[in-house]
């Protein structure tokens, strides 16, 4: 089955700086890579996703890049704000076969004012 | 669209009792996933279901835990004879019939075993 690793486990940045979180996956058949943000005491929420036919996707201050050859994908947050502080989870799966979502262990991002 | 609804939000059970957690998927969604989350930890996959069918239960403990998603009504995660170690937040997520995309989470049920 799929195995997803995520680094770093914790990340502290100054407000306004950029943050990068990296994930690697094991199953070359995986073709869908979502990112979720979970604030303290709340549910995980989908913030951005990317499919294997695309190398990069942007949504305002958030971008995700995918390197299928190396089997890794990254979340980039620019101009970080205190409200970006949360735990971020990546996942990888082959949606052609209705697989379950296997999440990475999470990255706790702290944006310092 | 009311989103993924879980109830109860908080559940307290004494050791040895049964816990029933309910999840109503988003309208039009036919795939349900259950996850367990301990404090300060990640989302541990438990089970993936479609209507009347368990697709993957590789994350479910072999004993005391069961899940169902009947033709009518919510998906139910059942924990029999609860122990203190079952205390956690249990999240369900749902996705459309094609499966594996755009999974949306419910607000979770926080189970406390006393």
Image (tube, rainbow, N blue to C red):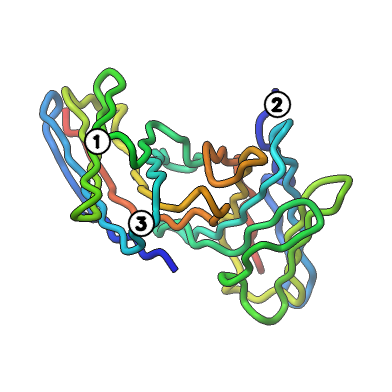
Report the residue marked by disc 2. B2
Quadrant where the image shows the N terminus of chain B: top right
The residue shown at (35%, 48%) is: A90
Q: Quadrant of residue B42?
A: bottom left
Q: Is residue B77 left or right of residue A66?
A: right
Q: Pointer 2 indicates a residue of which chain?
A: B
Closer to the camera, B42 or A113? B42
Residue A96 lies left or right of residue A110; in this view the side is right
Q: In this view of the protein, which residue sits in the foreground, B97 or A9? A: B97
Secondary structure under tag 3 reads loop
Reading the image, the residue beneath label 3 is A104
Q: CA distance from mark 1 to mark 3?
A: 20 Å
Q: Residue A18: percent from the left, percent from the top?
A: 13, 31
Q: For the C terminus of chain B, which image quadrant?
A: bottom right
Within 10 angstroms of label 3, few (less than 14), some, or many (20 or more) residues? many
B26 or B13: which is nearer to us?
A: B26
Q: Position of residue B21 (x, y in %)?
A: 74, 55
Q: Is residue B45 above or below residue A34?
A: below
Q: Is residue A50 left or right of residue B61?
A: left
Q: Which mark is residue A55?
A: 1
Subunit ID for the residue under disc 3: A
Q: Quadrant of residue B67?
A: bottom right
């Amino acid at each position: 089955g799929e195995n997803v690793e995520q680094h770093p486990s914790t990340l502290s940045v100054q407000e306004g700086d950029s943050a990068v979180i990296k994930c690697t996956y094991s199953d070359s058949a995986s073709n869908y890579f979502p990112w979720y943000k979970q604030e303290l005491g709340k549910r995980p929420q989908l913030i951005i996703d990317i499919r294997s036919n695309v190398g990069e996707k942007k949504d305002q201050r958030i971008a995700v890049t995918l390197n299928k050859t190396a089997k890794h994908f990254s979340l980039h947050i620019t101009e970080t704000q205190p409200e970006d502080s949360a735990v971020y989870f990546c996942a990888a799966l082959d949606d052609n076969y209705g697989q379950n979502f296997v999440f990475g262990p999470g990255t706790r991002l702290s944006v310092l004012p | 669209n009311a989103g993924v609804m879980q109830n109860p939000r908080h559940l307290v059970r004494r050791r040895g009792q049964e816990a029933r957690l309910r999840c109503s998927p988003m309208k039009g969604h036919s795939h349900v996933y259950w996850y367990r989350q301990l404090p300060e930890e990640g989302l541990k996959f438990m089970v993936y279901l479609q209507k009347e069918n368990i697709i993957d239960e590789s994350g479910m403990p072999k004993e005391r835990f069961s899940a169902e998603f009947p033709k009518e009504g919510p998906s139910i995660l059942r924990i029999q004879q609860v122990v203190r170690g079952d205390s956690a937040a249990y999240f369900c997520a749902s996705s459309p019939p094609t499966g594996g995309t755009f999974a949306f989470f419910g607000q979770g049920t926080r189970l406390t075993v006393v």
